[in-house]
Amino acid sequence: MSKFKKQKSGDLPAISTASLPDIVFMLLFFFMVATVMREDELKIENRLPNANQVEKLESKNKLVYIYIGKPSAQYQKTYGVTDVIQLGDKISTVQEVQTYVNTKRNDMPEDIQDQMMVSLKVDGSSKVGVLTDVKQELREAMALKINYTAKKGDPMRNLKK
Amino acid sequence: MAKRSAPEVNAGSMADIAFLLLIFFLVTTTIEVDSGIQSKLPPPIPEDTPPPPIKQKNIFQVVVNQDNRLLVENEDMEIKDLTNAAVEFLDNGGGEGRDACSYCQGDRDPASSDNPEKAVISLVNDRQATYNTYATVYNELVRAYTILRNRESSRRFNESYEDLYQRYKDWPETEKETPEYEKIESQVNEIKDLFPLKLSEAQPQER
């Protein structure tokens, strides 16, 4: 004399969700492994161009990032709408590039200091002028190994508006 | 009385926890670009150094103007034709005697470059040109070198330069003392020396 009636057999049995956690975990692990945490928070637009002559970058500890591009919408009031340079987390001037690179280099372990590479992440629609100034500063700072960071893809796609 | 077994932990909320984590990672993930075109800047030179003597015929002049148009050797050119023009210039091998180039397969036009060792590509860009154009032009010029290196590498080692270089780069860190590694290193350097990447980026003209 149970309180509950036995369910009528003949109903569709509920789909077992016991394997759902497994599936989700699988996805979770995939994303955990594939995730590369961003080094810096970008305050500028940064759509990298495509190129097919790319090589893989050096390991992270040898890299110094320099970003160039227009400030993103919420920063345009402060920094204007022309191309700016972002070093680390903050928007900087060309004159600060040398100091920044030298500081970064000194923070590296001594044996890999000469293998330092500067990764130039330049927005595709920005003007080359700023980049040229930055390169001039890098020469002065003796940071000669540089890398125009680009996505692997068809370079002709860059030119389409 | 039956032995009491430990009560089973309810795992029903496991999925919820996992979903929470999953969504967190989905949101925070930005797949970082970790590839790019390698380049090397020239070291700073003292102000009063005279420019090195280079014969005009050994210079391949590429100019990008403010409207992203291309001027190659004083002629208008589309970017898609740039690689072929550069290959032709580098591979010309017009030199004679000491400057002769034994592996070049070009036209041997005396008005073009002597040999790949002497040939310099000079890229001048206007400050107002966009980076997209600049990157594409730079990429196309590097591609010209890659084409020639691939050709020479296939002829000598039966393996394209890109594959060779990839193998060289991926060599396990622990096995760098082996003769195989030294062999591949010397092969890569040999090809690099045949077509040294001489891409000069001059100061852009002020406007």
Image (spheres, grey):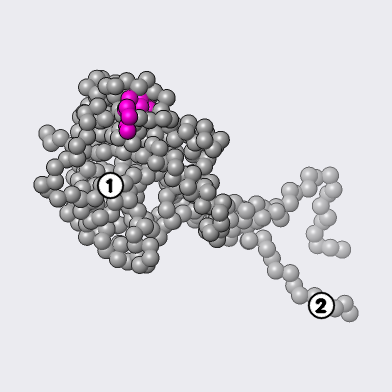
Q: Position of residue B149 (x, y in %)?
A: 44, 35
Which chain is disc 2 placed on? Answer: B
Mark 1 or mark 2: whose residue is earlier in sequence:
2
Residue corresponding to mark 1: B41
In the drawing, does residue A9 fall left or right of residue B62? right
Nearer to the camera, B172 or B68 = B172
| Residue ID at (24%, 43%) | A131
**What is the distance, in whole Å, between disc 1 and disc 2 at their CAs?**
76 Å
Nearer to the camera, A30 or B164 = B164
Label ID, residue B32? none
The boundaries of the magenta stretch are B85-99
Residue B91 within the segment the image draws in magenta: yes
In the drawing, does residue B134 fall left or right of residue B49? right
Residue A34 within the segment the image draws in magenta: no
Q: Position of residue A100 (x, y in %)?
A: 25, 59
Specify few, some or many for label 2: CA neighbours under 10 Å numbering under 14, 14-19, or 20 or more: few
| Residue ID at (24%, 50%) | B43
| Residue ID at (20%, 53%) | A140
| Residue ID at (27%, 21%) | B111
Amino acid at circle 2: Arg
Q: Position of residue A119 (x, y in %)?
A: 34, 50
In the drawing, does residue A5 fall left or right of residue B27? right
Label ID, residue B4? 2
Specify few, some or many for label 1: CA neighbours under 10 Å numbering under 14, 14-19, or 20 or more: some
* SS for dot 1: loop
Nearer to the camera, A42 or A121 = A121
Marks 1, 2: nearer the viewer:
1
In the drawing, does residue A109 fall left or right of residue B185? left
Amino acid at circle 1: Leu
Q: Position of residue A89 (x, y in %)?
A: 29, 57
